[in-house]
Amino acid sequence: MVQINSLNQIESVMLQLIADALNEVAEEAAKLMQDNVEKEVYAVGTQKGREYYYAGSREPTGQLKESVVNTSPITKGNEVTATVEHDKDKMAFHADTFLHGSNYFSPNDVRELLPMFIDQGLTGGIFGPKWENLKRPYFSKTKQELEDGLFEKLMAAALQKRGVSVGVSYTMK
């Protein structure tokens, strides 16, 4: 048990508890987004009859899913933040074979843009007519699920594990 002797110590202890809980929630949110990549992107490709992915493979590389990461919480003043994002370096790139890029698009490396292209259906014909304007909203769906109460539920549970019962409010961008 932590012995607290001042208001500054209370703030420090609480911020650490919040950061630890937020880290747990960010890990869960990353898993949720990976699940949504599986359902909204890969399964849709299968349903659309996609037969070719990369270098003769009949399966997706899985790199979009595996590139989903969460950052460790950062405390700045009395605010704690963490993000769930794609790490483009976890996806290979080869424009000549259309692996996360194309020689017919500028920039030809689309790894940073790929999440938006897929989520919003903005690929145009870059990956063939089957994918033109096809929204596969894995990112939007994840964000909506978190905004619809899942974040509060996960954060409250994570704080409860640490002995803190509170109402949860947040800002999501």
Image (spheres, rainbow, N blue to C red):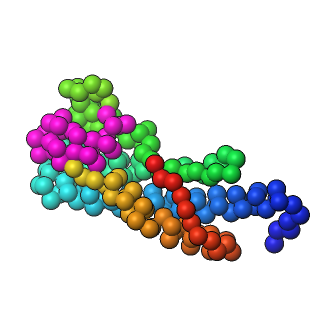
Residue 19 in which image quadrant:
bottom right
Residue at 89% x, 63% y is 5
Between 102 and 171, the residue placed more toward the observer is: 171
Q: Is residue 30 above or below residue 126?
A: below
Please indicate whether residue 155 sits to the left or right of residue 76 in the image.
left
Q: Is residue 104 above or below residue 169?
A: above
Residue 132 % position (x, y): 15, 42
Residue at 76% x, 57% y is 12
Q: Which residues are magenta?
A: 110-134
Q: Is residue 33 magenta?
A: no
Please indicate whether residue 44 sits to the left or right of residue 138 in the image.
left
Please indicate whether residue 91 sits to the left or right of residue 98 in the image.
right
* Residue 120 visible in the displayed image: yes
| Quadrant of the snapshot with the N terminus | bottom right
* Residue 161 visible in the displayed image: no
Residue 108 % position (x, y): 28, 27
Between 72 and 91, the residue placed more toward the observer is: 72
Residue at 17% x, 37% y is 124
Query: Furthest residue to the right?
Result: 5
Q: Is residue 17 above or below residue 71?
A: below
Residue at 46% x, 48% y is 173
